[in-house]
Amino acid sequence: MKFVDEAEIHVQAGAGGNGCASFRREKFIPFGGPDGGDGGKGGSVYLVADENLNTLIDFRHQRSFKARRGQNGMSRQMTGAAGEDLEIRVPVGTTVVNVDTEETIGDLTRHGQRLLVAKGGDGGHGNIHFKSSTNRAPRRFTPGWPGEARTLRLELKLLADVGLLGFPNAGKSTFIRQVSAARPKVADYPFTTLHPNLGVVRIEHDRSFVVADIPGIIEGAAEGAGLGVQFLKHVMRTRLLLHLVDLAPLDDTDPAAQVRAIERELRAFRPELLERPRWLVFNKADLLEPAEAARRAKAIVRRLRWKAPWFLVSAATGEGTAAVCQQAMSFLEAERRSGDRHASDPARSPAPGRATGADDDGD
């Protein structure tokens, strides 16, 4: 199924019921007075996070949602029934934005979470409210208030612990196939990944984390080039970024320049992303002699003045991938123990230790 990560919908809360203008009419009570009841409250519109949904594709077919109106007030001071609230199910990880103001209304990050997006209108007052010593028989009542109406943009951001970054053909899909049960498409041409893929990396029985394969980013992605900014936002929820680098590009492009290019795109999209823990993973080491692969990796690290952990792996053969996953698991567990701080906190420190060949000395 195609991954749909953005949708625009219109929600309309129910209007309140009108108040009632009536008078008490009973035998032997000729001047019963006003007894008109109030109108019922209109139904509100809520978004509810559901972990059983994973796309916003349903909103391509239905874009307008309206809650029920409140019932009108009745005689004998009876208030009309309230309109039933409308609940709209959305995937966990959905951000809700008011299109008219570009204000973020809320973020649905856990199963069952409810978010009020349009409040129902209050019911009108019946004529009993307007009785006074000088107006014993008021015929006045008020209509119900209209419910709120909004146009909303729903943005689905993947809920993953680790995000894979890199240029097209850096080997992200091969990496996630190697370390998890996810099976994204793999081929020898750019943009084989057209939508994000999630995989669960299981270290032990009760130790696992979720990794997201983000489609390849090219220069200008923050302005919509290539697959564009719609996929850059998926890195916002990740706690750790693994930046895959093609160590043996077929077109002789400069791997260090590609790293800097993606850093520029992250800065253009959201500057705080550069403060996110990010590790370099030099891929396709199997295409070179071991000594040459290590030499190239160390040269790139020196040019970048890279201080965070880096790894030398072959996603195709699996060599070195276990070490990356083990350290990523240790990093995430340390994060959780330290209070599960927000992923964009610049105070985060990189995980200690590096994989084989990760020292900055050498040739």
Image (tube, rainbow, N blue to C red):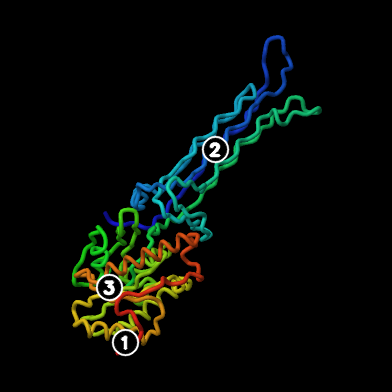
Q: In which quarter of the image is the N terminus?
A: bottom left
Front: mark 2 or 1: 1
**Vertical side of 228 occupied by 200: above or below:** above
Residue 299, numbered circle = 1
Toward the viewer: 35 or 214? Answer: 214
Residue 42, numbered circle = 2
**Vertical side of 303 occupied by 12: above or below:** above
Say which amino acid is labelled 3: Pro
In terms of sequence position, does the residue under pointer 3 or pointer 2 come before the other? 2
Q: Which residue is drawn at 70% across and 24% down?
A: 34
In terms of sequence position, does the residue under pointer 3 or pointer 1 come before the other? 3
User: Which residue appears farthest toward the top when viewing the image?
Assistant: 28
SS of the residue at dot 1? Answer: helix
Residue 168, numbered circle = 3
Tell whether 153 sits left or right of 313. right
Front: mark 3 or 1: 1
Would you call the spot at circle 1 few (<14 residues within 10 Å), some (14-19), or many (20 or more)? Answer: some
Tell whether 81 sits left or right of 284. right
- Residue 235 spot, x, y in % from top left: 39, 65
**Vertical side of 308 occupied by 234: above or below:** above
**Vertical side of 138 occupied by 56: above or below:** below
- Residue 230 spot, x, y in % from top left: 38, 65
Would you call the spot at circle 2 few (<14 residues within 10 Å), some (14-19), or many (20 or more)? Answer: many
SS of the residue at dot 3? Answer: loop
Label 2 and label 1: CA atoms lie apart by 67 Å
Residue 112, numbered circle = none
Label 3 and label 2: CA atoms lie apart by 51 Å
